[in-house]
Amino acid sequence: MAFISLEFVLFFAVVAAVYFALPHRFRWMWLLGASGYFYWQLEPQFLLICVAATAVAYVTGLQIEKAPDKARKQAVLWVGLGLLLANFLVFKYTSFFNETLRSLFGWFGVAYTVPEVHILLPVGISFYTFLLVGYLIDVLRGAKAERHLGIFSLFALFFPKLVSGPIERSKNLLPQLHAKYAFNYEQTVFGLQLILWGVFKKAVVADRIAPFVNNIYDNPHAADGFTLTLATWMYAFQLYCDFSGYSDIALGVAAILGFKLINNFNRPYFATSIQDFWKRWHISLTSWLTDYVYTPLTRQKFLKIKFYTMMLLGLFVTFVVSGFWHGAEWTFVIWGVLHGSYIVGSLLLQKPWNNFARKIGLDKRPNLYRAMKVAVTFTLVCFAYIWFRAATVADAWHITTHLFTGWGDARQGLRDFVGADLIGFLISLAGIAVVMAAGLLQGRVDVRALLQKRPAWERWSLYYAGAVSIALLGALYQSDQQFIYFRF
Amino acid sequence: MSETAPPTVAPDGASADGAIGAKPLWAVARVLLKGAALLTLTLASMLGVFLLVPESNDYARASLRKHERLARYEAPKIVLVGGSNLAFGIDSAMISRAIGCPVVNMGMNGYLGVRYMLEEVKRELNPSDLVVLAFEYDNFYKTVDGRPTDILVVVKANPTAFTYLSFDQQMDVLGSIPFATQQKVLRLLEEATVWAKDGLMGRAAPEADETTISAIETASGFTPEGDLISHLGVAWSEELEDGIIPPDGAIDPQVIGLMQAFGAQMQARGVDVMVSYTPITRAFYEQHAATLNEVHARIGRSPPLNTPSTPEAFAYDESFFFDTVYHLNAEGRELRTQRLIEDMERHLQGDSMCTQTAHAGE
């Protein structure tokens, strides 16, 4: 059951109607049943795995709390983490490690007789595993373990965020699952606005861009540097509109039911540095990695390294972990390495760069300086996307090494990119302009507050324009574009 | 908008603005009413675009004229049932002259599906009529229910066509309205882009022999009998479009089942049914000979269907074709019609089917 489908609309309408009709004490049961059904519709064979992981985390959380001292608490935590991570690693990385070993053995001319392994990846495993791991570490750090098995299961399985996040935190979501909530008109309208905006981003922008990008990335060897650059640039907007579109729908659905999920995006392509970008992009993952990977790494006492060096190392490792989390492919690892290198490099170069900027007077022209920083950050992010999007390391390498070819005939490159679908391309560009304009506006004023102050006819014109453009311009009817982050 | 934080929810369920729960039922009703209003406005706009923006051509309007003719002749008459291979590749007047019966060529578009093409003629068939079935080979491998967007265009031109559809088809056709509407909008945008480009950069000189298929596929391009003649004499510069035969050549069992059921039903009503074949290029036949002959064999094993000729009998040199492997040009049309006449005569075994003059009543 895709988020953008008639089935989901009907499903959610029934879920919301019954949810608000039920007394509070029965609501968790209803939402848990609905969440289970939602997952069952996606991948029935993996529901048990998800339930088992939840049970492990539930029991482990209680045992950590019960354990009399820190050492025993840590021991229990390691058992729980071991089980959760083993489940995650087996499903996600068995094939990757097997094939890596095969290549390594091959290089050394040693026979490797283990056959190829193909394991289907359960939907949402990366998201619910990180959610549960975060919960256990929070309990070790003193958070209260959840005693209510039903509420805890709902915390793990809550359908709006089950498949692609946001990766919730126990301190944010668990209290909300206990709280009483009555239907709220303002919040429902807000949720519907978010859903409309999310569907617009996904259907009118991301899915319109997708065929152009796929066409080039499916066979990058046939394209020149201009076309590859254009495809990568368009992919940046496809990925953003796809993932943030999903997140908006998830947040909107949750908001209607009275839950405030973690906001995952904050205008990332207006970031002025890579550090800034990661504060704005997939915020729930960045914050998770900061709390549960980076912080423990920098606080470790085994390696006798200066704090600053450890911080740089910690940042680098954290981004490599982020790359691994995204996918069991070397392309994702290299993507993580690139971002780690960007961050470490920018921190090392920060002082000399600031001195240089001051010397040439850039700091006296803040708007220009800011625009330059935004452009450089976006370019670096796009360069890393080559590795995120390419099907293989060889493809990514080819693209990287051919970016500067064929710029002499950019017109032909544009023709190659657009193909026969000029209108689809123009719709994509218009969609990007709308999304970026909204982002620009949001940077100056609170768009929602602004909208609420406008006369009804203006608000309704906007809703109408959104709905009609989705219906008439969205790639809804003959495309089967899944959300990109479903595969993670 | 996505980056705006939702209103905070306090643990007791009260929102930050404290507006919660005062009149929950009224609040629910407000949301539902406004949601319904937005949905209705959007759907109404879509329907408006669908109904008001004309199709890229009026080819589907030919359905009205074909049905008028079908209803006009009681019996005996010859009714040709199939897709565009019949529209592009039959000279009905030649058949009328040879057999002595009025001919109604129902052929329009193979994508309407075998079910529709059979259902649309049933009501108007009478004892002593002869029905010739000649479906494009593609039809043996794809759904009998046809392509909803193609049926929708015919239904829009000829609303009675909706009654020839099964319930599932009707739902599919209605469900295809949003997609069809979107295609119209995209077409308008494309035309606007071309218009703007021409305005800015000057209109490009058209190629001397440039004729689009949209200019050929028009209702006025049909003869009263239902043959398309607007393509005759037009030189087609592009390569022939191929037919779609799946690699495994697995025939959809529903197609021959439907044809057989139709044959049996018609036989019970005293209507004669004969199966013929769509014309194909010799190269296409040679490439798919085994598969096409299997179609012939399966039809042969499905009484009361009768096939006087084999698929090979309708395989011609490429020079006799127009734009696809199924569409004939003027010379090919004559050859194929002649062959069909011979098949009909063989099928009728010398019986004089018609006593009236071919064009009586026109």
Image (cartoon, coloured by chain):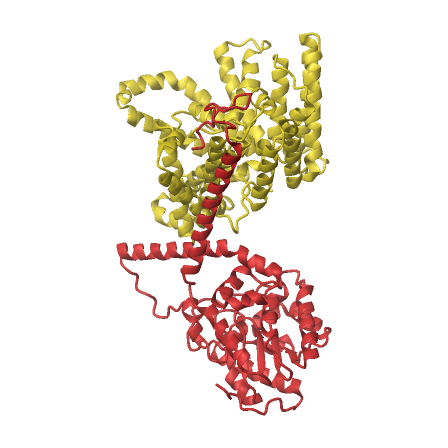
Chain colours: A yellow, B red
Query: Which quadrant holds residue A15?
Result: top right
Residue A78 seen in the current view:
no
Height in image: A478 above or below A436? below
Is A26 left or right of B218, judged from the image as shown? right
Q: In terms of depth relative to the viewer, which is nearer, A364 or A426?
A: A426
In terms of depth relative to the viewer, which is nearer, B226 or A327? B226
Q: Which residue shows up at 73% across the image and 73% down it?
A: B301
Tag count in the figure? Answer: 0
Quadrant where the N terminus of chain A is found in the figure: top right
Say which residue appears at 28% left-offset and 22% top-offset: A362
The reply to whether residue A44 is visible in this rendering is yes
On the rendered structure, is A437 left or right of B168?
Answer: left
Q: Position of residue B111 (x, y in %)?
A: 55, 65
Task: Provide residue B172's location: percent of width, then percent of height.
Answer: 57, 57
Locate residue A439, reporting x and y percent. 39, 33
Quadrant, the C terminus of chain A: top right
Above/below status of B39 relative to B13: below
- Indicate the quadrant where residue A326 lies: top right
Q: Is residue A91 positioned above or below A1 on the image?
A: above
Q: Is residue A340 left or right of residue B291?
A: left
The one of A184 and B132 positioned closer to us in this rendering = A184
Residue A268 placement (x, y as % from top left): 43, 30
